[in-house]
Image (spheres, helix red, strand yellow):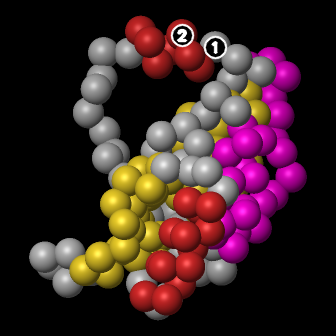
Amino acid sequence: MKIEHIAIWTLNLEKMKNFYLEFFDLKSNEKYYNPKKKFSSYFLKFEKGARIELMHRPDISEFIEKSESKLGITHFAISVGSKERVDSITELIKKNGFRIVGEPRTTGDGYYESVIADPEGNLIEITE
């Protein structure tokens, strides 16, 4: 078994797509659009591993505000291959004005990582 993809509801589909493509070496499919539901999405693909699905519909804000569920995924991790890449990608994200939640460090359980927030506040661990 494996994780096939992670889906993220987003308020600004294009901004989120551009963020992930710019910093994480992903490839995107063509935008999918369902006119009946006014739903649009992109699948962003890593060279290996799971994909990220970014999804949008105009009424998503209302759905989120009315939602009873407050528990869920707290973050996801993207492995970039080395400590040097963790450092350089984190620095590039910082220089572009995005929030760094945790500077690069070795955690108590031995991971070298930083934690950043994407444009809509989803937390991403960047790991070696």
Tell me the distance, in whole angstroms, between the alpha carbons under discs 1 and 2: 6 Å
- What span is in magenta? 13-37
Q: Is residue 33 magenta?
A: yes
- Amino acid at the residue labelled 2: Glu
Image position, residue 60 (x, y; %): 59, 19
Which part of the image, by quadrant, shows the N terminus?
Answer: bottom left
Marks 1,2: beta carbons within 8 A: yes
Residue at 48% from the left image edge and 40% from the top image edge: 121
**In the figure, 47 relative to 2: above or below?**
below
Whether residue 68 appears in this view of the structure is yes
- Amino acid at the residue labelled 1: Asp
Labelled disc at residue 62: 2
Q: Is residue 97 left or right of residue 107?
A: right
Residue at 56% from the left image edge and 16% from the top image edge: 61
Residue that badge 1 annotates: 59
Q: Quadrant of residue 9?
A: top right
Which part of the image, by quadrant, shows the C terminus?
Answer: bottom left
